[in-house]
Image (cartoon, helix red, strand yellow):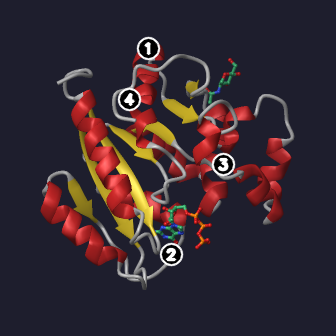
Amino acid sequence: MSGRKGDRYSVLLPTYNERDNLPLIVWLLVKCFKESGYDYEIIIIDDGSPDGTLEVAKQLEKLYGSDKILLRPRAKKLGLGTAYIHGMQHATGNFIIIMDADLSHHPKFIPEFIRKQNEGIFDIVSGTRYIGNGGVYGWDLKRKVISRGANFVTQVLLRPGASDLTGSFRLYRKEVLEKLVERCVSKGYVFQMEMIVRARQLNYTIGEYTSGTRRSNMSCG
Ligand SMILES: Nc1nc2c(ncn2[C@@H]2O[C@H](COP(=O)(O)OP(=O)(O)OP(=O)(O)O)[C@@H](O)[C@H]2O)c(=O)[nH]1
Ligand SMILES: *[C@@H]1O[C@H](CO)[C@@H](O)[C@H](O)[C@H]1NC(C)=O
């Protein structure tokens, strides 16, 4: 097993109508963790998706085992921010990885995030979607948020040094994430951005992983 002894990574996957994407993202995650040897669990938080995502999730739980795939559904769509909190409360890992289930984010970057965290002993590692291959998988979150009129975030985005704010693919130390969610008032996408702003205020260390910056030896692409 690689990684530091006792480290465990809990991946939070909030889903709403992801029946078609969920098997692929889970397959990629399992493959990636197996090949890289890190200890993991995948927590699926489905919010009563009408497309039957939860049934698919149950099949995946059977296939991969209930120690690896944890289902923590909620009865109805309550939003991303509270989905993360709900998932985190059930996480047994000392690290939490937050990503979208809709294939905006590729699991192959996770071992890179972990290596980056280990190198710098960072509290948070944030993916950047605008550089190199990272952009291929991401939609333009910044534009999306601005178009939704999220004033708090647009103000923050316009400040210098905010390049990593728009990431929604991140690795957190669990106790850091717990401290941050206590302080965050936003919902949805804005929540992830507010977390980085709060993290800066609290002087947590943030590593930024940009997929374009080095030749990768990732095996789980
Ligand atoms: N559990 C849960 N997951 C969600 C919710 N909204 C979005 N997701 C999931 O969060 C990830 C990001 O999805 P997006 O489509 O970018 O989120 P969104 O634009 O807020 O979703 P919509 O408002 O429904 O378009 C995906 O994995 C979605 O399936 C929600 O309310 N609850
Ligand atoms: C963060 O660091 C700055 C500069 O060193 C310091 O002034 C501030 O009090 C620190 N904030 C916290 C919450 O520790």
Q: Which mark is residue 119?
A: 1
Asked if one can make out residue 89 in the rendered structure from this viewpoint, the answer is: no
Q: Amino acid at mark 3?
A: Glu
Which x, y percent locates residue 101? 45, 58
N-terminal of the pair, mark 4 or mark 2, is 2
Q: Amino acid at mark 1?
A: Glu
In this view, the residue in front, 131 or 197, is 131
N-terminal of the pair, mark 1 or mark 4, is 4
> Which residue in the protein does label 2 denote?
78
Q: Which of pointers 3 and 4 indicates the residue nearer the eye?
A: 4
Q: Which of pointers 4 and 2 indicates the residue nearer the eye?
A: 4
Q: Is residue 91 left or right of residue 179?
A: left
Q: Is residue 130 left or right of residue 25?
A: right
> Which residue in the protein does label 3 denote?
194
Which x, y percent locates residue 122? 48, 23
Q: Is residue 84 left or right of residue 130?
A: left
Is 109 rendered above or below residue 23? Answer: above
> Which residue in the protein does label 4 denote?
111
Q: Quadrant of ligand 1?
A: bottom right
In three-dimensional space, the C-alpha distance between marks 4 and 2, rounded to whole angstroms, equals 30 Å
